[in-house]
Image (cartoon, rainbow, N blue to C red):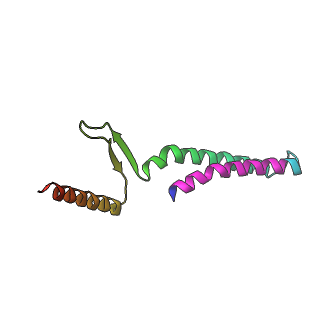
Amino acid sequence: MVSWSIFSLLPLTLVLWIAAAVVAGNFGPQSALIGPLVVAGIFTILAGLIGLIGILPLVGPRGRVFAGQRGHKDNVVELFHVHPAFVTAVQQVQLARAQSANLAQVP
């Protein structure tokens, strides 16, 4: 939800500036609506950029990729800010995979 609200500010800026251009074209450059529309557009672009740079990295899942270890084909990925249900599901899958691998090795 946070990412959608931040990303929606950037197109809203274009809508406000296009509205200011339309108002200027129809009512002349001295119209009282042009200033507030342009200022609102500047405010939304600044709020959107601050949200993209400052808020969005703090919200939502993130990860870090480590170099592959010797003897393994894949890189190790460490995930942050994930839902606890996702963590539980991944642990269950890993446990089931480890148990099936142990059963396959027993003669």
Residue interval drawn in magenta = 3-24
Determine the image quadrant of residue 67.
Answer: top left
Q: Position of residue 74 (x, y in %)?
A: 32, 42
Examine the residues drawn in magenta and state their main secondary structure: helix
Which image quadrant for residue 46?
top right
Q: Farthest residue in the front direction?
A: 107
Q: How many marks?
A: 0
Name the quadrant of the C terminus: bottom left
Query: How far across and how far down the image is residue 53, in percent?
Result: 51, 43
Task: List x then y, in percent, for residue 12.
Answer: 67, 52
- x and y, in percent, of residue 6 in the image: 56, 52
- 37 sits left or right of 80 in the view: right
Residue at screen point 36% across, 42% down: 64
Frontmost residue, 56 versus 23: 56
- Toward the viewer: 72 or 105? 105
Report the residue at 35% width, 50% height from top: 80
Residue drawn at the location 43% of the way across and 49% of the way down: 58
Residue toward you, 64 or 70: 70
In the displayed structure, would residue 28 be above or below residue 66?
below
Q: Is residue 15 left or right of residue 99?
A: right
Left or right: 96 with respect to 14? left
Magenta-span inclusion, residue 15 = yes
Q: Residue at x 76, y 48 (%)?
A: 18
Q: Is residue 83 left or right of residue 53?
A: left
